[in-house]
Image: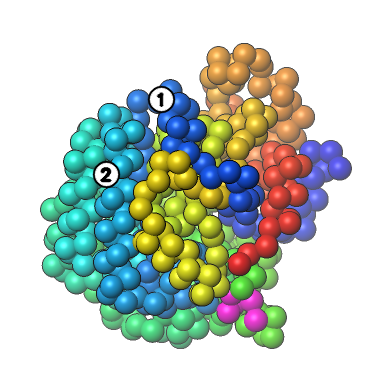
């Protein structure tokens, strides 16, 4: 199937694949023949004077019905303390190799990072301040949260530590929908949490999900309207993804009539984009909208897509250093996840074995990553491509770009930079898969989740 036919067919079928937020995905990772050493990644990282830091906190009170994130709900105090202590050690040791670089962003993801105590956050920020003292003037420091996971005192501490962006999963403002997705708190708690973070932080991202069990179009518009009443800087709107090993898969299999079809989710997407534009939000990706007056909504993603190395710390965190992409093992199963977390907490930092799982990208894969992420940012430049790779973009991807232009998924108003159109944002995950290599497609298809 040629590129144009590939795109046209999938768009006509209303296919809605998993949102593509990077390349390659973690499903392409495999066990390395030999553990990755710190010396393997130091040299590629030396080409950049900057670095992004991601810290994974894999603790949650519950697993939502749609969730396949790397986390555990076994939140014993001793488990968290051991994990945080090991994280602090890793921060210190990685600082020996990368501490001279300017930190562009720090992101605490999860799980639910705000299940950590003030003291535990203090340990981690103290370690970061010593190991990575150079910070960009616009350094973005983000912490993810759930509405029932913090109090005002913790928020005040986070702000004092330098956190300047909060990201919180709201998902719905309807009680029945919250219950259906496995969230055991009330809408009143969600409202109080939004008010608390909006009061303290100038940049707040709020997530909502459409396509939940029992959701109607009216209830979706109600939830979105209630969230927009708070005027957050950024709003992320995700269509629910039904993946293996989730409770929502069985629910949809048994009661498909309780869920939106893919075509209906695309119709809701169109309504969302029109509403967000009318509210003076700028679209930055398939899911993310930010206020027109603001900067990029998610600096870590932008910086990563532009080629800044990403240092991932903690069990389940991913790191990107040039050709090497790596992490600990990944799992959804509770016992396997707990085993991986315990192994991380028990084992001291070893520069001769920093990762067991990952992938080494070939020059062709690095080029594909550059193009795919550049298009996702609406910032794929012909001139920059030629300067970086020594050949014309059209030589390597002429057929793909002609297909995108033919279907009006991209334009190039200045004759250099390709930018996504409204239609391009809508079908960006389909478009992205057109740039996958056969190797990556096969690796993803053969992936077996633990």
Query: Quarter of the image holding residue 407?
Result: top right
Q: Earlier in the sequence, mark 1 or mark 2?
A: 1
Under tag 1, what secondary structure? loop
* Pair 1/2: label in front: 2
Under tag 2, what secondary structure? helix
Where, quadrant-wise, is the C terminus in this rendering? Answer: bottom right
Q: Which residue is mark 2?
A: 92
Where, quadrant-wise, is the N terminus in this rendering? Answer: top right
Query: Quarter of the image holding residue 375?
Result: top right
Task: Bin the neighbour count of mark 1 within 10 Å (Cα to Cα): few under 14, some 14-19, many 20 and up.
Answer: some
Residue at 77%, 58% (x, y): give it: 13
User: Which residues, given as a range, are shown in magenta?
Assistant: 246-250
Residue at 66%, 17% (x, y): give it: 392
59 vs 160: above or below: below
Left or right: residue 76 compared with residue 222: left
| Main secondary-structure element of the magenta-colored stretch | helix
- Tell me how far mark 1 sits from mark 2, CA to CA: 18 Å
Q: Position of residue 26 (x, y in %)?
A: 58, 52
Q: Which residue occupies the extreme right position in the image?
A: 1
Residue at 23%, 45% (x, y): give it: 128
Residue 15: give its label. none
Answer whether residue 401 is visible to the viewer in this image. Answer: yes
220 vs 21: above or below: below
Q: Position of residue 125 (x, y in %)?
A: 21, 50
Residue at 64%, 76% (x, y): give it: 249
Which one is nearer the viewer's eye here, 91 or 201?
91
253 vs 164: above or below: below
Residue 46: give its label. 1
């Amino acid at each position: 199937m040629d590129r144009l036919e590939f795109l046209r067919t999938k768009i006509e079928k209303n296919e809605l694949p998993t949102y593509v937020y990077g390349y390659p995905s973690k499903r392409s990772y495999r066990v390395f023949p030999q553990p990755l050493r710190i010396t393997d990644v130091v040299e590629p990282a030396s080409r950049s004077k900057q670095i992004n830091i991601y810290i994974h906190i894999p603790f949650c009170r519950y697993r939502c019905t749609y969730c396949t994130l790397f986390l555990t709900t076994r939140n014993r105090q001793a488990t968290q303390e051991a994990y945080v202590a090991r994280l602090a050690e890793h921060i210190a040791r990685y600082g020996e190799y990368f501490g001279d670089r300017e930190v562009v962003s720090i992101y605490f993801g999860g799980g639910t990072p705000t299940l950590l105590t003030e003291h535990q956050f203090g340990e981690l920020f103290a370690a970061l301040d010593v190991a990575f003292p150079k910070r960009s003037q616009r350094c973005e420091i983000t912490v993810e949260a759930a509405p029932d996971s913090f109090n005002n005192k913790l928020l005040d501490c986070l702000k004092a530590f330098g956190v300047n962006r909060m990201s919180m999963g709201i998902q719905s403002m309807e009680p029945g929908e919250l219950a259906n997705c496995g969230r055991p708190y009330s809408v009143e708690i969600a409202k109080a949490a939004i008010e608390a973070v909006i009061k303290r932080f100038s940049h707040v991202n709020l997530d909502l999900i459409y396509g939940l069990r029992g959701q109607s179009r009216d209830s979706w518009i109600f939830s979105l309207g209630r969230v927009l009443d708070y005027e957050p800087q950024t709003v992320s709107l995700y269509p629910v993804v039904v993946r293996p090993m989730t409770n929502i898969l069985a629910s949809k299999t048994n009661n498909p009539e309780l869920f939106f079809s893919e075509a209906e989710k695309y119709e809701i997407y169109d309504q969302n984009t029109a509403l967000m534009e009318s509210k003076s939000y700028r679209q930055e990706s398939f899911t993310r909208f930010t206020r027109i007056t603001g900067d990029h909504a998610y600096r870590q993603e932008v910086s990563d897509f532009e080629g800044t190395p990403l240092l991932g710390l903690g069990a389940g965190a991913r790191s990107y250093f040039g050709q090497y992409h790596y992490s600990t093992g990944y799992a959804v199963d509770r016992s396997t996840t707990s085993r991986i977390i315990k192994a991380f907490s028990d084992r001291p930092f070893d520069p001769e074995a920093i990762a067991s799982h990952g992938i080494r990208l070939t020059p062709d894969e690095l080029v594909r990553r550059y193009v795919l992420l550049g298009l996702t940012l609406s910032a794929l430049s012909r001139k920059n491509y030629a300067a970086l790779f020594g050949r014309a973009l059209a030589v390597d991807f002429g057929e793909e770009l002609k297909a995108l232009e033919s279907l009006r998924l991209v334009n190039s108003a200045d004759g250099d930079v390709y930018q996504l159109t409204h239609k391009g944002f809508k079908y960006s995950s389909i478009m992205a898969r057109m740039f996958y290599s056969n190797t990556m497609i096969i690796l993803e298809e053969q992936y077996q989740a633990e």
